[in-house]
Amino acid sequence: MPRNGVHPHKEFEGIYLIEGEGEERLGTRSLAPGENVYGEEIVKVGDEEYRIWDPFRSKLAAAILKGLHKIPIKEKSKVLYLGAASGTTVSHVSDIVGREGRVYCVEFAQRSFRDLVNNVSKNRINTVPIFEDARFPSRYRTLVSEVDSVYCDIAQPDQARILAENLDTFLDPGNEFLMAIKARSIDVTKDPNAIFRQEADILKKRGYAIEEMVRLHPFEKDHCMVRGGK
Ligand SMILES: C[S@@+](CC[C@H](N)C(=O)[O-])C[C@H]1O[C@@H](n2cnc3c(N)ncnc32)[C@H](O)[C@@H]1O
């Protein structure tokens, strides 16, 4: 008899709601049982291991809890992930897309990249770590085959432009992207809402549609998740 109840999320494939300690928390089924990536809680149910997905550590989890309507990441998806850092969110994306999916993880900070390789990619064959600068998609063009979606979390002042360069290179019509915006990385003096609109406008001018924007408060201050498409 399982100690904790685990239910598939009603809207999102590969994401689970896990009961425990009087509440329901987000989780993903581990593709690498026995491995802990960032100190996350592990819940065992029968032979399976589920990893609690902390919305205070991962903006994608925060966006889901804040009501994002759609996630262009599901089983078998091929995802280009810009700003992989040490792999906290990458590890959950890897769980979601599963063995037949791929997560191309672009990161340019040496230390984070080393942690990404040692703590995540070593145990997850569906991740492809790419030590590169996201400003130059042509440098990793040959390492990335077709992708279904692009996830961007690079916290750079010109991140909308950088994302657009990658979308121009990798995204086919009909496919979608997510971008996490941290207002303070762009301009500390401006109203965060004005910054979110300004970033969305940059993508619109590059020919991309904005489908929804979700504020991540209280999990992240002055952050927003944008979903859009080609
Ligand atoms: C906010 S952190 C990402 C957190 C991560 N997405 C997560 O949820 O686990 C931003 C990361 O983007 C990386 N980054 C920033 N600019 C970049 C660029 N031009 N190319 C590649 N990585 C970049 C930084 O080194 C940093 O690790």
Image (tube, rainbow, N blue to C red):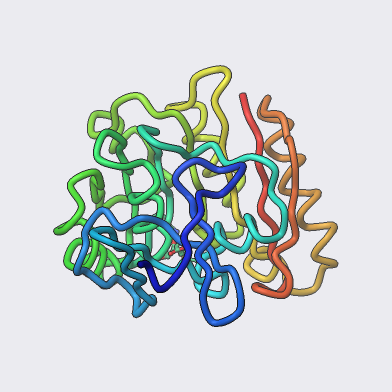
Q: Is residue 188 above or below residue 12?
A: below
The image quadrant that residue 72 belongs to is: top right
Q: Quadrant of the N terminus?
A: bottom left
Q: Is residue 27 above or below residue 145?
A: below
The image quadrant that residue 78 belongs to is: top left
Instruction: In this rendered view, identify the residue nearer to me: 225 or 8.
Output: 8
In x, y percent, where is residue 13?
Answer: 49, 40
Q: Does residue 217 appear left or right of residue 119 in this picture?
A: right
| Picture quarter with ligand 1 | bottom left
Query: Residue furthest toward the top?
Result: 173
Q: Is residue 172 above or below residue 80?
A: above
In x, y percent, where is residue 5?
Answer: 48, 64
Q: Does residue 127 appear left or right of residue 181 in this picture?
A: left
Residue at (44, 27) in percent of width and height: 169
In x, y percent, where is residue 139?
Answer: 29, 37
In x, y percent, where is residue 226?
Answer: 67, 47
Residue at (38, 41) in percent of width and height: 136
Residue at (21, 62) in percent of width and height: 33
Could you tell me how many numbered marks the image carries?
A: 0
